[in-house]
Amino acid sequence: MRVLVVEDDESLRSQLSDALSKSGYAVDGTGNGESAEIYGNQFPYDAVILDLGLPGKPGLDVLRAWRKRGNTTPVIVLTARGQWHEKVDGFDAGADDYLSKPFYMKELIARMGALIRRSQGRTQGPLAVEGVELDEETQQVTVNGTVHRLTGVEFRLLRALMLNRGRVLSKERLEEHVYDLDAERGSNVIEVYIKRLRDKVGKEMIQTRRGQGYVFGGQ
């Protein structure tokens, strides 16, 4: 999954990016409201963490612009402690949740995960499809009782496939959800990781549709 961190405090943005990366997310970050609006319109993020006090364009204006365009990506707004009116304004603009600064990193990550699950119609617990169970906390997959460890890219790729069971996902779409903006992308990188995943979950679980992409789920 891919998330966007919009925070003008460079130190905090770096801390957020590091924590989210360790939790298995591909992370893009910016400290400018104008660039944040462009990123949100251009890339298919699974969630956004949005500070309100931004240079270039205020966070609330960025959020309103996204919602006006029909962008329904879940957004957690970061507010100054005690500024209750910011929370109200945030919800009115289309925010899904908020956290007051300072906050606990684990709480933010937990809230974001819950928002993403709700947006996908999921409940708490491992992601399970046809005997393949993905634990998003430990980033391990269990197949017929056997536990396999996953690399960061393998985890994000498998999660994207399982969340879209039965749907054809093109290589380009998978790359958008697996990699951040700074990642180096080779022409056959996705194919290499698909092969590695098939070795762990079974070749029949990831079908190739020539000229289209990949489908998760046995035939």
Image (cartoon, rainbow, N blue to C red):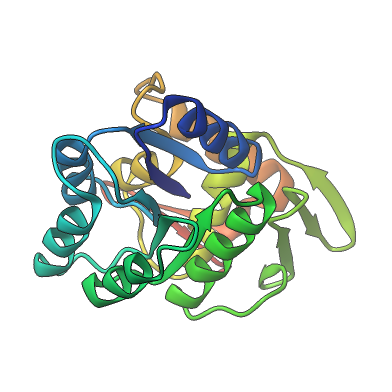
Q: Is residue 104 visible?
A: yes
Q: Position of residue 125 (x, y in %)?
A: 72, 72
What residue is rendered at 70% in x and 42% in y? 199
Q: Residue furthest front?
A: 82
Q: Residue furthest right?
A: 145
Q: Is residue 56 above or below residue 109?
A: above
Q: Position of residue 187 (x, y in %)?
A: 34, 23
Q: Nearer the viewer, residue 206 or 150?
A: 150
Count of labels in the image: 0
Q: Is residue 73 above or below residue 212?
A: below
Q: Position of residue 31 (x, y in %)?
A: 30, 32
* Horizontal side of residue 129 vs 175, given as left or right: right
* Horizontal side of residue 204 vs 47, given as left or right: right
Dividing the picture into quarters, in which one does residue 136 lie? bottom right
What residue is rendered at 78% in x and 50% in y? 138
* Horizontal side of residue 171 vs 162, given as left or right: left
What residue is rendered at 58% in x and 56% in y? 108
Q: Nearer the viewer, residue 200 or 135?
A: 135
What residue is rendered at 73% in x and 64% in y? 133
Q: Is residue 71 above or below residue 28?
A: below
Q: Is residue 195 visible?
A: no
Dividing the picture into quarters, in which one does residue 57 lie? top left
Q: Position of residue 213 (x, y in %)?
A: 35, 49
Q: Is residue 73 above or below residue 34?
A: below
* Horizontal side of residue 45 vs 99, given as left or right: left
Screen quadrant of the C terminus: bottom right
